[in-house]
Image: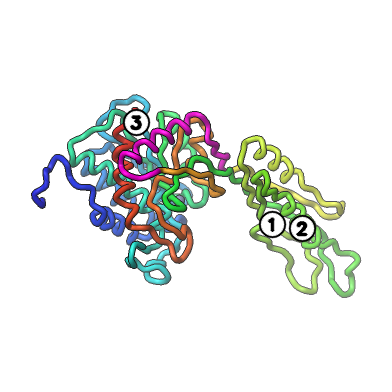
Amino acid sequence: MDGQKTNAPKVDGEEILDGIRQWVEIETPTYDGEAVNKLADVVEESMRALGAAIERTPGRDGFGDILTTRTPWGGDGPGILVLSHLDTVHPTGSLEDYNPWRREGDSVYGPGIYDMKAGAYLAYYAYQHLVRSGRETPLPVTFLYVPEEEIGSPTSRALIEAEAKKHKYVLVTEPAREGGKIVTGRKGVGRYYATARGVAAHSGSRHADGRSAIKAMAKLILEVEAMTDYEIGVTTNVGLVNGGTGVNVVPRECTAEIDLRIPTAALAEEYERRILGLATEDPDVELTVTGGINRPPYQKDAGIRKLFDHAKAVCAEVGFELQDMHTGGGSDGCFTAALGIPTLDGLGADGVGAHAQHEQIYFSSLEPRAKMWIRLLETLT
Ligand SMILES: [Zn+2]
């Protein structure tokens, strides 16, 4: 096109950014399955044009479809699973409202650009680059796009796990952080729902007859919050509380939602037992706690260490130093790592402000990351 050798197209940051922009400008809030499917349509078409085999699993419960695309090469043996999500936490209209597409210095803004449209696009771009260059990877590559990662992947988890079991490695396109660090460990996530039921009464004339569900829950909340132990990396958060019907009524019901983060499987079990075993002191207040671990902890085992060392060597060749870290946030990488499949996460673009109004990526991270993706796909065997 510009006189370059056609068998070695340039990895071009501006071209990558144009592609990311197309994906960002299709807004994809998790709960709007139709909106997410509009982006799935675009990805499907682009992948089809590059010769990939397409499978589309219809969405359930109002969520978007799951899109699975496979390279035409590499055979049927276990290969590389590239895991992306197309949904974002931002409601439709965010692009007009609080985070319009714009470029200021090295920062490029847009809802969901960092988590994780830029990352998903980078992996796609690597595939496109290989096809354009007439190169193939030794292993087959599956690109899996899920529609509801931001709420814990309730409709895609089974498929993610089934695919992961058929693959040798999993590469997750979640955002990089703190200067481009990738993720080789994540805390597991538990979600619990507590309901206290007491006895309603008039707060003036029959106060003694009442049993306050809010009062019982207040004690319970303090107990749950006290389980936080930064030393061992366990945190609990009561993030939502609801209760009562009027200021002059002793409240009959109160509910609380608990978020638990745990670094290891053993601690997950222990804290799950403690939370499900919560009880009230008052025999007239009935307490139920439901829920469970929705993402297991992701720990850096020998397989992950080896895969990371490989990626580090690839990045050194590309021209940057790859570092890794452990983070508290969950991702679909937790599912695949828990199955024992070597998983690297956080391979997306560097930036800041995931889920926030100022969400942005750093343009300068695009070219090196694209090169890393190309070389990773080409060198894993
Ligand atoms: Zn994400």
Determine the residue positioned at 49% across, 52% down: 150
Residue that sits furthest to the left in the current view = 3
Residue type highlighted by circle 3: Leu
Residue 217 image label: 2
User: Is residue 128 shown above or below 252?
Assistant: above
Q: Describe the element under mark 3 as helix, strand or loop.
A: loop
Residue that sits furthest to the right in the current view = 208
Eye-nearest disc, 3 or 2: 3
Asked whether residue 163 is in view, the answer is: no
Q: CA distance from mark 3 to mark 2?
A: 52 Å
Disc 3 crowd, CA 10 A, few/some/many (<14, 14-19, 20+):
some
User: Is residue 97 shown above or below 130?
Assistant: below
Magenta span: predominant SS is helix
The answer to which of marks 3 and 2 sits earlier in the sequence is 2
The answer to which of marks 3 and 1 sits earlier in the sequence is 1
Determine the residue positioned at 41% across, 67% down: 94
Q: Describe the element under mark 2 as helix, strand or loop.
A: helix
User: Relative to residue 129, is residue 64 drawn left or right?
Assistant: right
Dividing the picture into quarters, in which one does residue 52 lie?
top left
Dividing the picture into quarters, in which one does residue 277 lie?
top right
Residue type highlighted by circle 1: Ala
Residue type highlighted by circle 2: Met
Magenta residues, start to end? 295-321
Q: Quadrant of the C terminus?
A: top left
Residue holding disc 3: 380
Q: x and y percent of residue 133 in the render?
A: 18, 39
User: Relative to residue 45, is residue 354 drawn left or right?
Assistant: right
Q: Is residue 307 magenta?
A: yes
Eye-nearest disc, 3 or 1: 3
Disc 2 crowd, CA 10 A, few/some/many (<14, 14-19, 20+):
many
Q: x and y percent of residue 301 in the render?
A: 53, 32
Tell whether label 2 touches label 1 (CB within 8 Å): yes
